[in-house]
Image: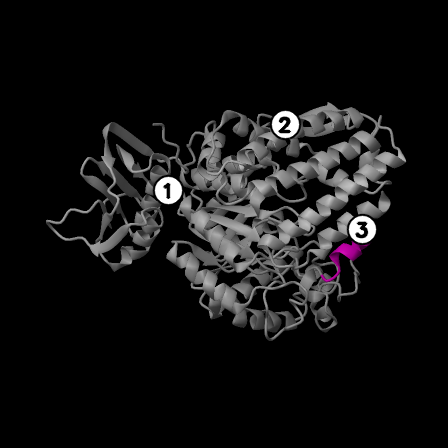
Amino acid sequence: MALDLIPEPKKLTRAAGQFEMPRVVAMGIEDHALHNAARVAQQFLPRSSVNISTRGVRDALALSYDRRLKPGGYRLRIARTGVTIGGVDAIAVMHGVQTLRQIVEQCGSDLPILTINDWPDFEDRGVYYDVCRGRVPKLERLFELADQLARYKINHLQLYIEHTFAFRGHPKIGTGASPLTAEDILELDAYCTDLGIELVPSLATFGHMASMLKWPEYHDMSEDWGIGKYIAPGSDKLNGAHLRGWTLSPANPKIYDFLDSLFAEFLPLFRSKRFNICCDETWDLGMGQTYELCEKKGKGVVYLDHIKKVRRLSKKYGKNAMFWGDIIRQYPELIKEIPKDVTVLDWGYAYDHPTARISDFKKAGLPFHACSGTSGWVTLFNRVPEAVANIASFAAAGYKNGAQGLLNTDWGDGGHYNFMEYSWHGFLFGAEQGWNTRADQKSFNRRFARLFFGCDDKAFVDAIVALGDISELGGYRYQSVWRHVFFATMDDDVLRLAEPRDFLVSKHFKIRVARMRFDSKLGRDTVKRLQGVRKEFERIAKKNDADPLGVLSYWIFAVDTLIHAARKLSYLGPGGRDTAARRQELKREMTGLMRRFERLWMARNRRSEIRITLGYYKKALRSL
């Protein structure tokens, strides 16, 4: 029987024969530190007992240490007499157990004779998940996320937080957002630790502060005094409404007492000794309160001084800082001034992002991570071809240049209407690339379908590829054009693109730029393609042994939103025939989608700020 594994192991050798796993499994562990790995094994070997390994007593599954292996490595042997897993430490043994889980799930009790020698390319293999752009998952959903990530050897998880933590000292900050509580974080931290995952705190501390600084009592700490006031030449070009209260102002020393008060409640909840202080996209820095300070010292120096001050605050709580590297890249002469215990998170999410420039941080002698993306934001379904290209490119560049880790990000810009369920392909592809950058990319879609959905039917795999290709279509950077059509009002320019223009298109996950018409015919053709995708997803969803996590109901919803967008283009776009009856059809369809969206959201998430996305629906409906 063919075996499919994610991540694909470095070395796998098979031999003739089988080992029949007994119905009641005697499991031996070398010491108590391997108990967590044994408990994971008991999830797929439920009739098993755990004992300390004893000379002269044979165990069907033996877990032990092997210090001779490569860093993070494990060796899994299935012999005629039993199964042994050795690892350099307890976490490595757990990774071997997760590989055995995949084998048992495919082979049942008749296991093939084989030896796997495996080790990771990156010490850190992480997922960064946004929980503050409108949607906060239920705690049990975050547990499920950790369970699934651990299955595929992810060992690092961050949750992006701006205002979605319940600060007791600042109770207004989380108002109306269903924030995570201290108890939530403590429980999740303990849960992740048992799975071999480090839950690393992350909190906005410079840019992206509008959700906190919108309250009047905090206005004086923002770059624009919280009222959109700017004094620098050229600041009139900023979109003041969007940026209002966006960035903390280093010109006001109060901000450091404010940050300290946040840290005092937040950071001690985490066992991790690291802390992502973020500090990205400080678009209006130097335009308001800090104008004179930046004129005197230079904007880059003011930016780096803030990093250093927040680093010192982080040290107060026993944490080493990491931050996003986009702004410091604008001041390459200052990279060498970054303290050597600060980790730089180098990010960029385009399919053609210049990932090789990550070598800049290597030359500066800094620890750094390669940070890719799932391309699941500002879209109706993830732009999977772009995610695959971006993740693979960043993994290769990071590995070549000695990055400490691969951190795969998933964002929720504009209300987080893109469900977490859409990102599993990107999460698992990132998990594989973080472990083995030379894994076979051509077989990944089949392996993903088999291991995650329980079905490797070729038609189903082809449907996954087709959905990714359709979603990729874009005339906007980091965005899908279908999202803009879906929420478009009748006067929106996206419905008036009469002349041929350049779009990003994908065929079998190969991206290129093509000149094409975005018109009624394209809409009709896309509806037909999507109906074929939907038929395959529905077929698999009806199987009793498929889709164990119930993800396909979310994917089918994504397909239906895309069908609606394509139908809307076919009726209202260039070459279409706009009639009152057709508008009523679109209105009925979108009303039904809005109700389904709310049900799917509430099934797995807190209510949070669902009003943001419902507002988009209602605006489009009013226009129809």
The residue singled out by tag 1 in the image is: 120
In the picture provided, is 404 more to the left or to the right than 492?
left
Label 2 Cα neighbours within 10 Å, binned few <14 / some 14-19 / many ≥20: some
Quadrant position of residue 178: bottom right
Name the residue located 67 percent from the left edge and 41 percent from the top edge: 379
Label 1 Cα neighbours within 10 Å, binned few <14 / some 14-19 / many ≥20: many
Q: Can residue 350 be seen in the rendering of this structure?
A: yes
The residue singled out by tag 2 in the image is: 532
Name the spot of residue 109 as percent of width and height, x first: 29, 38
Q: What residue span does the magenta drawing correspond to?
A: 234-245
Structural distance between the alpha carbons of marks 2 and 3: 46 Å
Label 3 Cα neighbours within 10 Å, binned few <14 / some 14-19 / many ≥20: few
Spot the residue most to the right: 580
Q: Is residue 260 above or below residue 331?
A: below
Tag in front: 2 or 3: 2
Structural distance between the alpha carbons of marks 1 and 2: 39 Å
Viewer-proximal residue among 529 and 314: 529
The residue singled out by tag 3 in the image is: 237
Name the spot of residue 105 as percent of width and height, x first: 37, 39
Quadrant location of the N terminus in the rendered image? top left
Q: What's under tag 2, amino acid-wise?
A: Gly
Does residue 236 show up magenta in the picture? yes
Quadrant position of residue 459: top right
In the picture provided, is 582 more to the left or to the right than 158?
right
Structural distance between the alpha carbons of marks 1 and 3: 47 Å
